[in-house]
Image (cartoon, rainbow, N blue to C red):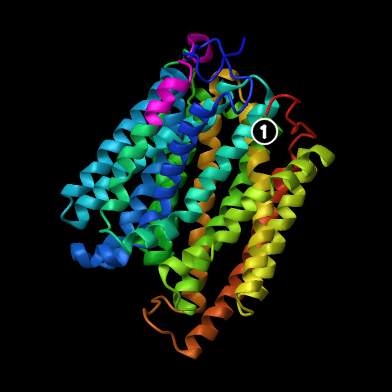
Amino acid sequence: MTTTATAPPDASRTYPSLRAAWIPLAALCLAFFVEMVDNTLLSIALPTIGRDLGSGTTALQWVTGAYSLTFGGLLLTAGSMADRLGRRRVLLVGLAVFGLLSLGVAAVTTAGQLITLRAGLGIAAAAMAPITNSLVFRLFDDKALRMRAMTLMIVVGMSGFVLGPLLGGTALAHARWQWLLLVNAPIALIAAVGVRLGVPADRPQDLTRDKLDLPGAALSVATIGLACYALTSGVEHGWLSAATLASVLGAVAAGIAFVTHERRSRAPMLDLKLFGNGVVRGAAIAQIGTAIAMAAVMFGLILHFQYAYGWSPVRAGLANLPLILTMIVATPLSEWLASRFGHRVACLVGAACLAGSLAGLSWGVSHGYVAIAACMVVMTVGLRTVMTICAIALVDAMPANRTSIGTALNDTAQEVGTSIGTAVVGTLIAALVTTQLPAGTWSDGLVASFFHGERITYAVLAVVVGLVAAVGALTLSDSRLTEEPAGQE
């Protein structure tokens, strides 16, 4: 049974087309956009924040680190809660908390307060991220419509991630840095209204009746949180420092305890038997590869444009536009690859694009912006192909009452990959160039050294990303469903 966008949402109804579902789709895309853009929005404003609050470099690192740490650590827990308590309900709570906490920036006077606020925003974002994608599956019965909607969500989300520095740099030219967070409040409100009006309420049969696995949730948070912190600490304090080694050992111990507990639990938070499904396992692995590539390029090119080239934040943000434009225009190519050759082969082609673009960057960083932009285009074709197909394949392979934990697993894989990519670039640049990148105009010698470090870094990443993404792609199915039936647009 179907309904129109003007009809009241009903748990037993779905939408016949993307156009009919424009209200809930717009709301879900808006929620996904704001949580993704918040990952990178403040990166441009860190020098301004440091001067305003009188904070040091370590504190500024935690302004962004606190958000990513709580966000990545709680994704699985939030997805598990949504599958039990109701996906729309948890999303609405997350949007409310996100909006209210964003207003709290007006009262911030110290770096410690801002770090605490950012940690809270990360928690709220974790309650939103896996649910926005899983709710797309509830809007449509038709798998082709689901793929089109998921494609739209991914394009919007990645646009937010890439546009964060550009939007932040532009806003700082006209307003105080606090407005970068204050603007989240009205956006969250609009998204909540759209979700309330357009997304059907959860049906009891669509949720799992298992009790919430609190020990599993705590162990997953500890495992992912300590692992992500270990990567950050390795770059900041050194890989043999006490903090880094303690974090690594703690993550390993918590991970072993998590696996042991989930295997014995009657109602596990994450049923490890799901990884016996090659599609679930392969999609998660491939997503780690895409996130490593995306984070490494974003982090590395921000340094490249602003430091080595001496570009302003706004100009550096504009330099990332090939990623956004290609993400949009590559849709027909990615869909053709999947429909012509199947998901497995299409993702292998995407993996080759990722590896090839990174190898190209190892040459292009010392040959000007045009060469870099060409590599960014090839990379985005790979990202667009692998990310969309794997997100669809992973969630579609999950049981109907576990879609939120499926999207949480997808997001967690990407968050882990993001941490790895950033850590690899940070570590290699520190080892090959310098541990302290000076502000202002660089000397010719430092620029040459930086280019040399980039060449080695991207060459290493080409091998790592190519292997990880290809290994994951090999276990996907030969499904070729990408076309939307006639009359469904």
Circle 1 residues within 10 Å: few <14, some 14–19, many ≥20: many
Magenta-drawn segment: 191-208
Q: Quadrant of the N terminus?
A: top right
Horizontally, is 73 left or right of 172 in the view? right
Residue beneath the point at 24% across and 47% down: 116
Q: Is residue 265 above or below residue 229?
A: above
Q: Is residue 342 located in the magenta-colored stretch of the structure?
A: no
Of residue 480 and residue 358, the one placed in the foreground of this image is 480
Question: Which residue is at a point 36% across and 39% down the rendered structure image?
Answer: 187
Left/right of residue 279 with respect to residue 399 in the rendered view: right
Label 1: which secondary element: helix
| Residue 296 position in % (x across, y down) | 54, 61
Expressed as whole percent of the image width and height from the top left, the position of residue 265 reads 48, 21
Q: Nearer the viewer, residue 387 or 471?
A: 387
Residue 205 falls within the magenta-colored stretch: yes
Amino acid type for the residue under numbered disc 1: Ala
Q: Residue furthest bottom?
A: 444
Residue 73 position by quadrant: top left
Which quarter of the figure is the C terminus placed in?
Answer: top right
Residue 468: tell me if it is visible: no
> Residue at horizontal 26%, vertical 62%?
49
Q: Which residue is mark 1?
A: 393
